[in-house]
């Protein structure tokens, strides 16, 4: 005899465009959600949680874990948005972890999946999406939540009917979203305890200033990336950061928008991702988020680091340890950007 569990899968996009506030808010929201659920007797009895992240690959950070034992993982930014790989991993994980009904016992409740993404898939996702759609709604209730202007809601509708748009990406918007997710899990677990299985789920009302049913996508999509990312390292602290450039609406130039501290990186440059951009197209440089150095310099080894304005100041490359003066920025050299 065992309790029937309510499995909850969080699928989190950890691509470069999520760097900075978005990823921090997701981590914060996850902690708040778990703390709240742990104080709820119904959720405590039924909810089990798993976290899958995706960027250029997908990874199950936490296998399906009893709520009491669950610790939210740290999220790491990486290039790419391998949505198809993530959907396959989700399907496989549900197949492995969720107990099926057999002749002798009732299986787990149907899993709830909350997926957050802010970009276009960078892999072949269609087959995985079609497989997931064919298995639904038996397999899981999937809530796909698109965040920001780069999401194509039709891509999300290729594997679920429940496609939402997070229209308010402020800290308050993220907070309300996770409060709503938490309330949805709570009302689901209570309904299931009262024998509500098989009935349509009635979820709490969405905060209408924050979440909406995603409208169909507009059709034409500009093939050029809206954002470009470059990895750089602080020459003083030797810690990595990500420089964000955003394309002008009518033009081909990308303006420096922000620099985000990174916990760790798995690469010294965006070499495995496309597309390449020419630094001629980049306007300005975001200041180093660690030491506020105002410019960036590229070493002969290809690594970027922050640098002081003084052209005679000696900078030591955080990658190859060769020292030199940063000199005036040459411009026009090709650097490989990454589209997240
Ligand atoms: Zn620095
Ligand atoms: Zn170097």
Image (spheres, helix red, strand yellow):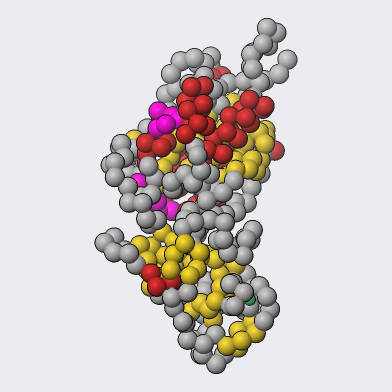
Residue stretch rendered in magenta on the structure: 157-171
26 lies above or below 263: above
* Quadrant of the frame with the N terminus: top right
Above or below — where is 330 with respect to 153? below
Q: Residue at x 66, y 73 (%)?
A: 319
Q: Is residue 209 above or below residue 193?
A: below
Residue extending farthest to the top is: 103
Residue that lies at the very extreme toward the right in this rendered image? 1
Q: Where is residue 32 in the image (x, y as percent from the top left)?
A: 54, 45
**Is 2 situated left or right of 204 in this image?**
right
- The residue closer to the viewer here, 230 or 29, is 230
- Please state if 114 lies on the left or on the right of 265 as rendered: left
Q: What residue is drawn where x is 58% and y is 72%? A: 302
Q: Would you say residue 186 is visible in this rendering? A: no
> What x and y, as percent, mark residue 81?
51, 47
**84 falls in the magenta region:** no
Q: Is residue 198 above or below residue 173?
A: above
Taking the image as drawn, is residue 278 in sight? yes
Q: Where is residue 264 in the image (x, y as percent from the top left)?
A: 63, 61
Depth check: give the residue in front, 278 or 56: 278
Residue 175 vs residue 40, the one in the foreground: 175
**Residue 280: quarter of image:** bottom left
At 61% across and 86% down in the image, what residue appears?
Answer: 324
Position of residue 3 in the picture relative to residue 289 (left or right): right
């Amino acid at each position: 005899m065992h309790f029937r569990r309510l499995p909850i899968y969080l699928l989190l996009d950890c691509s470069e465009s999520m760097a900075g506030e978005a990823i921090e808010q997701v981590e914060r929201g996850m902690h708040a959600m778990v703390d709240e659920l742990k104080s709820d007797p119904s959720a405590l009895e039924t909810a089990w949680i798993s976290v899958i992240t995706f960027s250029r690959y997908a990874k199950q950070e936490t296998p399906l874990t009893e709520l009491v034992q669950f610790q939210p993982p740290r999220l790491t930014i990486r290039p790419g948005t391998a949505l198809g790989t993530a959907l396959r991993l989700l399907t496989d994980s549900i197949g492995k972890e969720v107990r099926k009904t057999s002749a002798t016992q009732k299986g787990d409740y149907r899993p709830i999946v909350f997926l957050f993404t802010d970009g276009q898939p960078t892999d072949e996702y269609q087959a995985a999406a079609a497989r997931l759609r064919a298995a639904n709604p038996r397999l899981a209730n999937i809530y796909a939540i698109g965040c920001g202007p780069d999401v194509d809601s039709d891509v999300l509708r290729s594997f679920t009917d429940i496609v939402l748009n997070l229209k308010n990406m402020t800290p308050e918007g993220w907070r309300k979203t996770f409060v709503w997710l938490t309330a949805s899990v709570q009302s689901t677990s209570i309904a299931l305890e009262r024998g509500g299985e098989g009935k349509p789920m009635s979820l709490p009302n969405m905060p209408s200033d924050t979440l909406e049913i995603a409208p169909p996508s507009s059709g034409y999509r500009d093939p050029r990336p809206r954002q470009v990312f470059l990895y750089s390292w602080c020459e003083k602290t030797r810690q990595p950061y990500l420089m964000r450039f955003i394309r002008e609406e009518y033009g081909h130039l990308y303006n420096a928008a922000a620099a985000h501290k990174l916990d760790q990186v798995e690469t010294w440059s965006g070499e495995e991702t496309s597309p390449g951009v020419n630094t001629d197209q980049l306007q300005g440089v975001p200041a180093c988020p660690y030491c506020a150095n105002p410019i960036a310099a590229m070493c002969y080894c290809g690594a970027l680091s922050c640098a002081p304005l003084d052209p005679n100041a000696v900078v030591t490359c955080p990658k190859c340890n060769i020292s030199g003066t940063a000199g005036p920025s040459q411009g026009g050299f090709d650097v490989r950007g990454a589209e997240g």
